[in-house]
Amino acid sequence: MNTGTDSSSALRSLPAWLPELAKSQGLLMDALKANRAGCYTDAQVQLLERRGRSVLKKGSTPALGALGISLIGFLFTLGVASRSQDSEVVTGPGPEVLFAAPLVSLILMVVGCFVLRSAWRSWQNLRADLRQNRISFVEGQVTLKGPAVVDYISSNRPENLAMQERYAYMVNGVIFRVDPKAYSAFPGSWADSRFRVYYVPSCNWIVNMEPISRMFPQTQ
């Protein structure tokens, strides 16, 4: 069996619009062969690690801020308490404030540690998937789950992180969070096609897509 000929035939049978779709979604069509074999290419690993570091930074920044505020709160409380003990005259915040300040600081510390731990765990899971070539796929029609595309195009406003969480694709029950620009670019001549979607299982990040066709065999 000539696998090289079969692979070339499979690529030639792909629709002409696939490169345009891949570009609009930030995908690497050259990596399809590796993805079908259950592997990531080096270029995909670099892109995914860059994205993972960006997400880690966004998740860590508020957590580190909360930890910093909690530390300042503890130091403030200790300073005020020690000053009150050294002075015979009671000045400064009352006992209610001295009780509430460390409590709020403790809550912020717990929340900050939880968020930081969650962000770091997600980063470690992503790296483990990439190192061990854990790649999954799902087949079906892509359904847009979010605002109407026409509303996104007409709004010309920068999207913050909370808004970006609203943009997603759903394929056979699996939800993929996507970039708003990719979301707005998806409607096209390919929109009604059925796809095989390759993704990183720990975070459901799409790494590639190809239409399901009877013209060529699909293999893992």
Image (cartoon, rainbow, N blue to C red):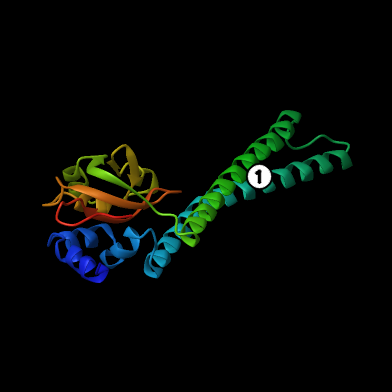
Say which of 89 and 205 sits in front. 205
Which residue is at a point 19% across and 49% down the rendered structure image?
153
Task: Count the labels in the image.
Answer: 1
Residue 63 horizontal side relative to residue 45, left or right: right
Q: Residue at x 59, y 51 (%)?
A: 64
Asked if residue 159 lies left or right of residue 87, the reply is left
Q: Which residue is at the front of the view, 135 or 119?
A: 135
In the image, what residue occupies the spot 38% across and 58% down? 38
In the rendered image, residue 96, in percent from the top left (x then y), is placed at 72, 28
Which image quadrant for residue 6? bottom left
39 vs 186: above or below: below
Mark 1 Cα shell of 10 Å, populated few (<14), some (14-19), many (≥20): many
Furthest residue toward top: 96
Amino acid type shown at disc 1: Ser
Q: Residue 199, image x and y in percent?
A: 36, 52
Residue at the spot of label 1:
70
Residue in the picture at 68% in, 43% down = 73
Quadrant including the N terminus: bottom left
Furthest residue to the front? 1
Is disc 1 placed on a helix, strand or loop? helix
On the rendered structure, is 113 left or right of 183? right
For the residue pair 212 and 115, the one nearer the viewer reads as 212
Residue 69 shown left or right of residue 212 in the figure? right
Q: Is residue 179 visible?
A: no
Q: Position of residue 145 (x, y in %)?
A: 27, 39
Residue 40 visible in the current orientation: yes
Tell me residue 53's x, y (percent): 48, 60
* Quadrant where the image shows the C terminus: bottom left
